[in-house]
Amino acid sequence: MFYAYILQSINHPAQLYRGQTSDLKQRLAEHNAGKCIHTSKYTPWKIRFYAAFETSALARKFEQYLKSGSGHAFSKRRLGL
């Protein structure tokens, strides 16, 4: 399975990060270990939302959507983020 996800910083709740991976548990550990330059400043992180897909391409497309203006609106309206 492949996943598109939204993380929220525990110490800075206004900070969200959207991404995609094939191993959600491992990827969260990497974010919390500071291995990603985009998220290292706001560790630790928690998963607020994820969606599973059968292909990497679908997960990547949904990640791109989540990063778009429409995706941000979706996150606010449907997920309360």
Image (cartoon, rainbow, N blue to C red):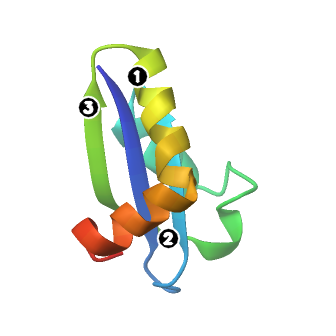
State left or right for residue 29 relative to residue 52: right
Mark found first going from the N terminus, 1 or 3: 3
Numbered disc 2: secondary structure: loop
Residue at label 2?
A: 44
Residue at label 1?
A: 58
Q: Residues within 10 Å of mark 1 (few under 14, many from 20)?
A: some
Which residue type does callout 2 highlight? Pro
Instruction: Please report the residue visible at 49 percent of the width from the left and 30 percent of the height from the top.
Output: 61
Towards the viewer: 52 or 9 = 52
Instruction: Please report the residue visible at 42 percent of the width from the left and 28 percent of the height from the top.
Output: 59
Instruction: Please report the residue visible at 28 percent of the width from the left and 15 percent of the height from the top.
Output: 54
How far is disc 2 from disc 1 in space, using C-alphas? 27 Å
State left or right for residue 24 relative to residue 80: right
Mark found first going from the N terminus, 2 or 1: 2
For the C terminus, give its image quadrant: bottom left
Instruction: Name the quadrant containing residue 73.
Output: bottom left
State left or right for residue 41 relative to residue 9: right
Q: Residues within 10 Å of mark 3 (few under 14, many from 20)?
A: some
Mark 2 vs mark 3: in front: 3
Which residue type does callout 1 highlight? Leu
Residue at label 3?
A: 52
Marks 2,3: beta carbons within 8 A? no
Q: Residues within 10 Å of mark 2 (few under 14, many from 20)?
A: some
Towards the viewer: 10 or 49 = 49
Total numbered labels: 3
How far is disc 1 from disc 3 in space, using C-alphas? 9 Å
